[in-house]
Structure formats: structure tokens, C-alpha cells
Amino acid sequence: MNGAGWNGTDDQMRQRPLLPTLALLALITSLAAPATAQINPNAQTGNAGGDNDDDPLRAPSAVPGLNGYSRGLQLGASISTRYEDNLLRQAVKDDGVRVRPLVTGGYGLGLGRGGLFVQGNYGRDIIYGNTRVAASERLMVGGGLDFNLSRCTGEVGGSWRRGLSFLSDVSQFGGFSVESATAGFAAQCRLGGALSVNGSVLRSDSTVSQNIAGPTTSAFNQQRWSYSAGIGFGNPTLGQFNLGGSISDSTMPGRQVLTPEGFMEDGLDQRSVRLGYSRRFGSKINVSAGVSYLDTQPSTTVNVIFVDGVPQLVDRPGFKGAGYDAAIDVAFSPRLNLGFTAGRNTSANGVVGAQFVISTFWAAQIDYRLGSRYTLSTGVNLRNSQFRGAFVSQLDQFRRQSDDFTRIFAQFGGRLGQRLRFSVDVAHNRRRANPAVLNFNSTGVGLSLGYQLGRN
């Protein structure tokens, strides 16, 4: 069960090409591209419904922003209402209510051993009781092609989206908007019974702007090319081994670096190599794990940077070291399931005042089915972040060093009839940061209702 409780269906998941973990490596959303994000994609862990816009810890699709091919017409409508006692997630609490109505649509057309699809949504973020965040539209359009040939499966597609962004890393939670465009390709080809190769290419552009009145900034705009390739070997008895690597090159056109040759755009180069293993043990246990070598370096080590036209002296170290990822799913019974996720990676985070972040995290979630219609979930998500190349800007006015973020949540959700889905959740978030001015505590309660037409 995902965090929202009704964002996808088992039938839809079965209709998507099944890409290996490594093919998902470069295909993370446009705002954050971990150098090792190869987490078992069979489940998601650690998100409460509507609590934030953080990416799932386990990547759910091949090309970011797309749900993949599903035959026929799908129409849906939903509304999420959430009260937060600290809506902006700052040191001084300021509560508010966020209402998010949304309509969604999609159409999939089968073409031989593949299918074309288009998807879109339109909604709004409406804020009550808090004048520091303005209401905003929420838009997405996208489409692509899924294919399943004799030896190869894959997806090619792209999407464009715009709207408020509610991310846990941001000090002014919800105080900015993001416009992003992504396009990508991912494929896996089997060579014989046990050997496979895979690869992916992703292009993403994002523009960040303030949602409230004030000075503008282009410091967080980002453009990225990402590539991955790998080889897999295994079978159901032995398990699956994967060896692969990734390259991700990012530029930040809104930040200028003063070099001896003149001004140049800031940038970040990420490289990684990973050895992974995954295996299902009977019908109850599914395990995925990997170890990685990470090499993340600024495009230039010159430390005079112009942000919003103001020069800053910024320490710009790189990082070379080990990373890891692990995911375990245990079905104790047909009703009780446990999911555990852990990892260490680096990411070029486009929404905080740092060139990149070294993150260590773990999350656990327990799901208990109540009859055939309802599920009760509870979980915890812990993350330590070390910020490298920290700077100040109009959006992030303090130089971050490190922080520890904790989320605890409980959720009850399920079906009311064949078409209606609902979820009720409560979540508590806490950050302890250096500098301490970024500390916050926030507790929220949410209710989500969704109605779906088309294939379920």
C-alpha cells in the first residue's frame, strides 16, 4: 500500500513493463537525483497521505512523473484536506489548512506488444488560515510508449508539471513553486535464460520560484542529464545479481562561479558503481540489497559563487565513498506485512541551499488488513543529511550544515464501494538542525477521498 492509499492498483502495476532496479537508477524525479536509488520497487515505505511531496523511497515507475501504460480510459477525482499546526515548518509555529482538489485523466491504446498512453491532471492548492502561502494551480501533462518485445521491455516518455512543492527538506515548507519537465528512456533486454542488460537516459529541467511576494531568485534552477547501464545475472532459485553504473551531470544556470577564465555556470558531476542482489524467499520474504561506490564532485572547486547577484565565499568539497541500499518485505500472514528500507546516497537537491546532500536514511512500515476493504498502516522514517557547498539565497537564508529529520505516522484507508477510496492519517514531523534556527516540530491530520472511473 502506498502512502496515499489509492494512487495505484495491482492491475495497473502488472500492465507496466517490469524494469530491474538498476534501470531505475537515473530515473528519479526532477528535483532530486540520488546517485544510488536502486531500492526494491515492489513497495513504497515511509510516506503518510498528503503529508509531503517527497519522492517515495522505492521508485514506482520507469520514467519519472508517469504512471505507465494502462489500456483504455481512466478518469478520477480526489480531494485532500489537511490541518498542520506548523504549516510552514519553521521554528515559530503558524498553523493552517491545505485543501487540494484534483482531477486526473489518462488513456492507453494498445499497439501490438506495447501501448501508447497520455496522462494529465489539474488541481489547486487552497490555503486557509495562513497568509504566508498563496493558493496555486497544480498541473501535469505527460505521455509515453511502453513496449514488450520478444527479448526487451521498456518505456519512453516525458512529462511537464507545475505547482506548489511541499518538501520536507525546505525550511519554508510550501513557500515556493516548481515547474519541471522530464523526458526519459529505460529498457531491459534478456540474453538467454539468466543474463540481461539494461540502461536508461533521462533529461530534466526545473525552475523554482517563490510563491509569496518578495525578491525573486534563480539560484535553484537546475538542468540535468542522467545515464545508467548495467548487467544482470540470475534465476528464481539463485536470486538476481546486478552490476552497473550511473553518470549524472547537472548545471545550475542561476548560480555563477568566478574562475580565472571568467564566469561559468555552477555544476555537479555524479558517478557511481553498484553491485546488487535481490531474491524472493518463498511467498513471504522479498529482499534487495546493494553496495555502491559514490563519486560526487563540483564542476569546479573555485569557491567564489554569485547567488542572486551577490558574491559568496563557499567551501566546495566533493565526496568519494561508500553507499548502500536495502529493502526487505515480510508477509507474516495474509493480513500483516512489514516493509523496511535503508540507504546512503548523494543527491543534487534542487530545493535547498547546498550543492549536494549526503543522506543516510531508514524507514519501516507495518500494514494490517482489516477484512477485504480496509488497511491500517503505521511507520517511521529517519534521515540524517550532511549538506556540502552550502550557500544563502532568498529562499534559504541560512547556511545549512546538517540535520536529523524524523517522521512518525499512522493511517487508516480503504475502499467504500468499487470506485471510492479514502484515507485518514496523522503524522508528526521533527527536524533538529545545525544551525538550530532551522529546527521545527509539526503535527498534522489529513483526510483524502478519491473516485476512480475506468479500469481498476
Image (spheres, rainbow, N blue to C red):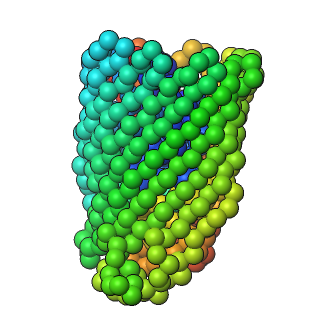
Give the vertical position of 221 relative to 367 (above or below): below
Location of residue 337 in the rendering, given as x and y in whole percent from the top left corner: 68, 27
Q: Decide if residue 437 is in sight here.
A: no
Count of marks, rendered view? 0
Give the vertical position of 11 relative to 124 (above or below): above
| Foreground of the two, 19 or 190 | 190
| Foreground of the two, 86 or 104 | 104
Where is the C terminus found, in terms of image quarters?
top left
Give the vertical position of 152 relative to 205 (above or below): above
Location of residue 289 in the rendering, given as x and y in whole percent from the top left corner: 70, 39
Location of residue 413 in the rendering, given as x and y in whole percent from the top left corner: 52, 29
Q: Quadrant of residue 141?
A: top left
Residue drawn at (30%, 31%), measured in percent from left and top?
Answer: 144
User: Going by the image, does 95 lie left or right of 368?
Assistant: left
Residue drawn at (69%, 57%), measured in percent from left and top?
Answer: 322
Location of residue 87 in the rendering, given as x and y in whole percent from the top left corner: 43, 59
Residue drawn at (68%, 61%), measured in percent from left and top?
Answer: 321
Where is the N terminus found, in terms of image quarters?
top right
